[in-house]
């Protein structure tokens, strides 16, 4: 099992050149979950927080479905998945049901009979109704991603395919083949601006266009010098010269695409056209093979990619990148994460367009150290702030960050490993600790920090 430590936390959130301004946040906690978990699925269904599966305190996967209402707290666990799973995706459908896909099943304990195995199945359940509909997949999936589409379907990206789940038919009805196999990738649902190739109208059409003025002019050339100094006579036929009367604005359109970025051992960027059912690779690539980065679409329509793991070295990345509609990749803002951040979660503030990052882990081959503070980026990176996380919550990794509403974000689950030295310093027993409380942060005012 990978060890999660909480040592040297100042270095984990280390800053490159002097401290960043800090935005104070209002943190609170919700009552403990009936069953603390990590690597679970988490999301909202109507006003309910829904947590599915995950690894429990015995480090084995659980089938439990946990549900909490804003007014009444946690309900008793009255329903469960068809099979235990963790590291799956969880997507809420338009009718309130929940789709979970893939993940692993088994135990992380070294002495366990069943090491985690990847699942080739999905399930659909209603948070308040017992039972789950089981769906077989064509291949096992872990390290995949999922997005609910505007028409209510769900696109699941992973392995060799983008699979489209239709909630009206309760099954996967279409599949789009990927150019590269993907797992551990980042993905976004993107309204990409498309500039079509110019169409040149015929001369007859241009003559009828009041924005063009067609004039004829004879251009005569008496002699044209040659390379050897001689000259030849030449007369050009009358030429038609087109003078536009007015500037024609470039017409553009947008289309909804999935942008699939990197993955284990991959630096390519793949664009999936959901309407056409096709996929193609961008010519531009990431600077290095990158896995477990986070990505979001900013208000100005660009894609921001943050951190990740360099799969060649196994170390977390401190860089960010812009991906734009011209299919170019350029260096993003310096988020001052000198030790890097993998598996973070990004949100875009709907009030002012700020990009907010929480969670994330410093990675190397042997350990994970949770990043102790979030980031808020404003004005395309020109303004950057540190978002502090309470000490009690900052030591936990493998958390689910979900958006409760426009101004609140919640962190669900998580675990840490306490070794003997840390246990002595904190006067607790060594071992694995899970975060049962849900930590809730209220975002700062849109004008705060300016």
Image (spheres, rainbow, N blue to C red):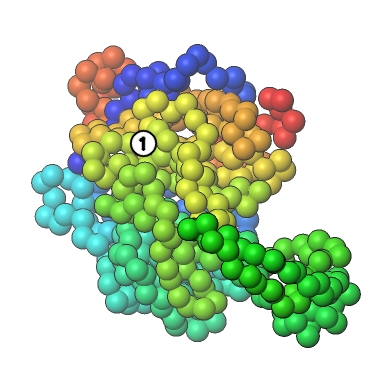
Q: Residue furthest right?
A: 210
Assign the C terminus to one quadrant of the image: top right
Residues 216 and 381: in front is 216
Left or right relative to 227: residue 222:
right
Q: Is residue 26 above or below residue 41?
A: above
State the SS at label 1.
loop
Left or right relative to 217: residue 131:
left
Q: Tell me the residue at 82%/75% (across/down).
A: 216
Residue 267 in view: yes
Residue 449 in percent (x, y) is at 68, 25
Local crowd size for mark 1, using a 10 Å CA cut-off: few (<14), some (14–19), many (≥20): many
User: Mark 1 sits on what residue?
Assistant: 317
Assign the N terminus to one quadrant of the image: top left
Q: Tell me the residue at 50%/14% (across/down).
A: 18
Q: Tell me the residue at 37%/60% (across/down).
A: 144
Residues 85 and 380: in front is 380
Residue 204: quadrant of the picture: bottom right
Left or right relative to 178: residue 50:
right
Residues 124 and 250: in front is 250
Q: How many marks?
A: 1
Q: Is residue 311 above or below residue 185?
A: above
Residue 108 in percent (x, y) is at 21, 47
Residue 3 in view: no
Q: Is residue 22 above or below residue 251?
A: above
Residue 114 in percent (x, y) is at 15, 57
Residue 254 in percent (x, y) is at 64, 66
Residue 29: quadrant of the picture: top right
């Amino acid at each position: 099992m990978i060890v999660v430590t909480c040592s040297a936390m100042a270095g984990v959130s280390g800053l490159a050149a002097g401290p960043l301004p800090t935005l104070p946040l209002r943190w609170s906690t919700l009552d403990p979950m009936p069953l603390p978990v990590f690597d679970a699925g988490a999301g909202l269904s109507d006003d309910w927080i829904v947590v599915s599966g995950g690894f429990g305190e015995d480090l084995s996967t659980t089938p439990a479905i946990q549900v909490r209402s804003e007014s009444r707290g946690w309900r008793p666990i009255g329903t469960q998945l068809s099979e235990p799973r963790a590291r799956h995706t969880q997507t809420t459908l338009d009718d309130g049901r929940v789709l979970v896909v893939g993940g692993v099943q088994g135990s992380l304990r070294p002495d366990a009979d069943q090491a985690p195995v990847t699942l080739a199945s999905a399930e659909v359940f209603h948070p308040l109704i017992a039972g789950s509909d089981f769906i077989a997949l064509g291949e096992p999936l872990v390290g995949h991603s999922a997005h609910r589409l505007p028409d209510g379907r769900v696109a699941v990206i992973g392995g060799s395919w983008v699979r489209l789940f239709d909630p009206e038919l309760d099954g996967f009805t279409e599949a789009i083949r990927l150019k590269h196999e993907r797992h551990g990738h980042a993905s976004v649902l993107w309204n990409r601006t498309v500039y079509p190739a110019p169409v040149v109208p015929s001369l007859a059409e241009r003559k009828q266009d009041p924005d063009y003025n067609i004039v004829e002019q004879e251009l005569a050339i008496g002699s044209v010098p040659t390379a050897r100094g001689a000259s030849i006579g030449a007369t050009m036929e009358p030429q038609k010269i087109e003078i536009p009367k007015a500037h024609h604005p470039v017409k553009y359109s947008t289309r909804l695409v999935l942008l699939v970025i990197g993955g284990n051992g991959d630096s390519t960027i793949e664009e999936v056209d959901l309407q056409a059912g096709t996929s193609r690779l961008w010519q531009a690539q990431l600077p290095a093979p990158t896995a477990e980065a986070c990505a979001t679409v900013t208000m100005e329509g660009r894609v921001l990619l943050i951190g990740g793991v360099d799969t060649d070295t196994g170390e977390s990345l401190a860089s960010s990148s812009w991906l734009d509609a011209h299919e170019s990749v350029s260096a993003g803002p310096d988020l001052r994460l000198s030790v890097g951040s993998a598996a973070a979660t990004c949100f875009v503030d709907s009030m002012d367009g700020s990009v907010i990052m929480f969670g994330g882990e410093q990675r190397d081959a042997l350990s994970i150290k949770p990043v102790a503070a979030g980031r808020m980026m404003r004005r395309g990176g020109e303004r950057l702030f540190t978002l502090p996380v309470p000490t009690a919550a900052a030591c936990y990794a493998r958390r689910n960050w979900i958006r409760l509403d426009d101004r609140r974000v919640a962190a669900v689950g998580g675990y840490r490993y306490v070794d003997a030295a840390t246990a002595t310093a904190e006067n607790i027993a060594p071992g694995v600790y899970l975060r049962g409380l849900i930590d809730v942060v209220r975002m700062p005012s849109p004008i705060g920090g300016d």
